């Protein structure tokens, strides 16, 4: 057994049976091992940022890590932006990064890079194997690290000779570290704050946005009068009928400050205190009142369900029905608007769908119009590095096993960062519907001009314009093997949505807005 064969065997023993890959010369022995050892599903991505984004989307739905296969430092660098997003989403990923052979590294060949340095900025665990006999042991440690709560990125760097040399030893799966216990003092403090105050916000993040935690949070809010909100960015939010119909903290700093200004106590459940996405001249970085007190009920690495259950019991909060989100909206006709598209999507969305949302500025208001949709999961751009919407949708579809329709709400500019995802969707025949919101400009940055107090001129505005020449998304999608059509009205978009939901494979709708 060589090192690569011990690697594949160990990953399978550790429960990692999916690999998103863009291999190069240093990884050829891993590729060869896949033919010798059955059980690993490999999904090819045509660019590394697609590969890492797919691994992120996979974890958010499957709740277990996949591996990536990347080529040397530059390949890791190509995938770095979506690893940043995955880190913010608390996604567990095992990166396998090939590298120069140990004896070749000192010669500083063209692809030689500080691979460990690149990995360290986005990984919770990094290791370089130095002998084939160590690869299995190191792979088992990487898999355990990726599974460590709440999920983290583990990067294993494999010089090519550690893969091709004989002497590989497969390792058994290692135990995953236990989730840290809830602090009883934090529970009692939160209970006391809720008993004694009425201007309290409970802010839910991470797994606190999933169904069991939502039910417990609603019990607590109903018993105490506290307000519930979601953190602005979460890797996954359970939404739709039967789930908690609450809003997230606004993106816009002025709006967020207005929403949060009257809360004097904020209880954080796997969430961080609200801060602005960016700094703006004359505006504070924090979005909550400077006199507000922050209370940590549970940290990112703790179990929010256990924390909320302990708090509900400390308050003797009775079990209550989840609030009714109101009637299911009906599809809207006419010219596209944010409200109309959100209502149409809510009306037509199939049961148990997954929404990958990179609609940027156009989709910020979608939440309040989609509470009454069929139950679904909503995946957000968690780290702000654009280009994750299509890869996350692709990985989520792989995790859904073909039975869950994935709806990608995608802006045209950011879609260009990772449009190769469409090719993988076609190759794997994944049930993905992309609604491509095409205004042929970087509209979010036009708003940011005003926010930072800058005055754009013709040169500046030309940097935000995508209409010279126009991007033809129907042709782009067709060139990737994906069926596509263009819509200019909401009724046309609705008809195309229904058509796509009946299909097994991918479909792209270019909606001119």
Image (spheres, grey):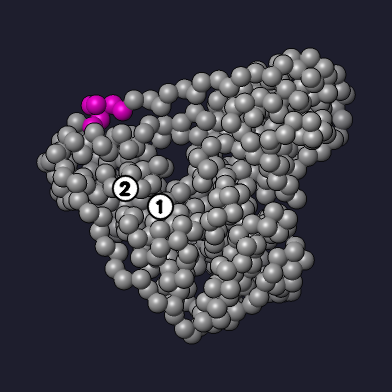
- Mark 2 surroundings within 10 Å by alpha-carbon count, few (fewer than 14), some (14 through 19), many (20 or more): many
* Residue 200, visible in the rendered structure: no
Q: Is residue 303 above or below residue 47?
A: above
* Front in this rendered view, residue 235 or 19: 19
Quadrant position of the N terminus in the picture: top right
Magenta span of residues: 182-187
Tell me the quarter of the picture where residue 106 sits.
top right
Residue 347 located left or right of residue 102: left
Q: Residue at x 62, y 26 (%)?
A: 13
Q: Answer yes or no: do the residues labelled 1 and 2 have beta carbons within 8 Å?
A: yes
Lower position in the chain sequence, tag 1 or tag 2:
2
Report if residue 434 lies within the magenta region: no
Label 1 residue SS: strand
* Residue 225, visible in the rendered structure: yes
* Front in this rendered view, residue 275 or 500: 500
Q: Residue at x 52, y 30 (%)?
A: 147
* Front in this rendered view, residue 343 or 352: 352
Residue occupying the far left of the picture: 196
Locate residue 227, reporting x and y percent.
24, 52
Locate residue 251, reporting x and y percent.
42, 57
Residue 38 located left or right of residue 204: right
Locate residue 340, reporting x and y percent.
44, 76
Q: Residue 238: which disc?
A: 1
Q: Is residue 278 above or below residue 351?
A: above
Locate residue 77, reporting x and y percent.
70, 40
- Mark 1 surroundings within 10 Å by alpha-carbon count, few (fewer than 14), some (14 through 19), many (20 or more): many
Tell me the quarter of the picture where residue 358 sits.
bottom right
Name the chief secondary structure element in magenta. helix
Residue topped by disc 2: 214
Report if residue 184 lies within the magenta region: yes
The number of discs equals 2
């Amino acid at each position: 057994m060589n090192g690569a064969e011990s690697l594949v065997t160990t990953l399978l023993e550790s429960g990692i049976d999916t690999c998103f890959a863009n291999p190069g010369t240093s990884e050829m022995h891993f590729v060869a091992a896949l033919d010798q050892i059955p059980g690993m599903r490999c999904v090819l991505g045509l660019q590394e940022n697609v590969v890492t984004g797919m691994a992120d989307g996979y974890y958010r739905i499957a709740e277990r890590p996949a591996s990536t296969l990347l080529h040397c430092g530059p390949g890791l660098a190509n995938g770095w932006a979506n690893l940043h997003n995955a880190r913010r989403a608390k996604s567990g990923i095992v990166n396998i990064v090939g590298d120069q052979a140990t004896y070749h590294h000192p010669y500083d060949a063209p692809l030689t890079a500080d691979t460990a340095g690149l990995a360290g900025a986005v990984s919770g665990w990094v290791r370089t194997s130095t002998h084939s006999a160590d690869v299995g042991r190191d792979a088992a440690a990487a898999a355990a690290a990726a599974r460590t709560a709440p999920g983290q990125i583990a990067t294993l760097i494999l010089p090519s000779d550690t893969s091709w040399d004989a002497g590989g030893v497969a390792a058994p799966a290692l135990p995953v570290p236990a989730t840290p216990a809830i602090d009883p003092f934090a529970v009692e403090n939160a209970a006391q704050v809720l008993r004694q105050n009425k201007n309290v916000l409970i802010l839910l993040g991470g797994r606190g946005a999933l169904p069991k935690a939502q039910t417990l949070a609603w019990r607590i809010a109903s018993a105490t009068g506290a307000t519930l909100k979601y953190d602005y960015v979460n890797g996954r939010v359970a939404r739709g009928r039967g789930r908690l119909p609450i809003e997230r903290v606004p993106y816009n700093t002025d709006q967020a400050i207005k929403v949060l200004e009257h809360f004097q106590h904020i209880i954080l459940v796997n969430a961080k205190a609200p801060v602005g996405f960016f700094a703006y001249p004359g505006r504070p970085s924090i979005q909550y009142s400077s006199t507000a007190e922050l209370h940590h009920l549970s940290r990112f690495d703790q179990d929010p369900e256990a924390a909320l259950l302990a708090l509900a019991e400390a308050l003797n909060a009775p079990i209550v029905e989840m609030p009714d989100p109101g009637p299911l909206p009906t599809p809207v006709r006419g010219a596209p608007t944010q409200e109309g598209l959100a209502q149409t999507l809510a009306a037509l969305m199939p049961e148990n769908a997954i929404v990958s949302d990179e609609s940027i500025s156009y989709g910020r208001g979608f939440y309040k119009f989609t509470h009454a949709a069929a139950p679904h999961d909503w995946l957000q751009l968690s780290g702000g590095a654009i280009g994750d919407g299509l890869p996350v949708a692709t990985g989520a579809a792989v995790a859904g096993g073909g039975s869950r329709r994935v709806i990608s709400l995608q802006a045209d500019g950011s879609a260009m960062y990772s449009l190769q995802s469409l090719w993988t969707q076609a190759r794997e025949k994944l049930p993905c519907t992309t609604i491509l919101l095409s205004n042929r400009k970087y509209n979010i940055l036009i708003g940011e001009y005003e926010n930072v107090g800058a005055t754009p001129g013709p040169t500046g505005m030309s940097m935000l314009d995508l209409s010279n020449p126009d991007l033809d998304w129907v042709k782009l999608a067709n060139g990737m093997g994906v069926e596509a059509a263009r819509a200019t009205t909401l009724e046309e978009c609705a008809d195309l949505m229904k058509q796509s939901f009946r299909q097994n494979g991918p479909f792209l709708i270019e909606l001119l807005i």
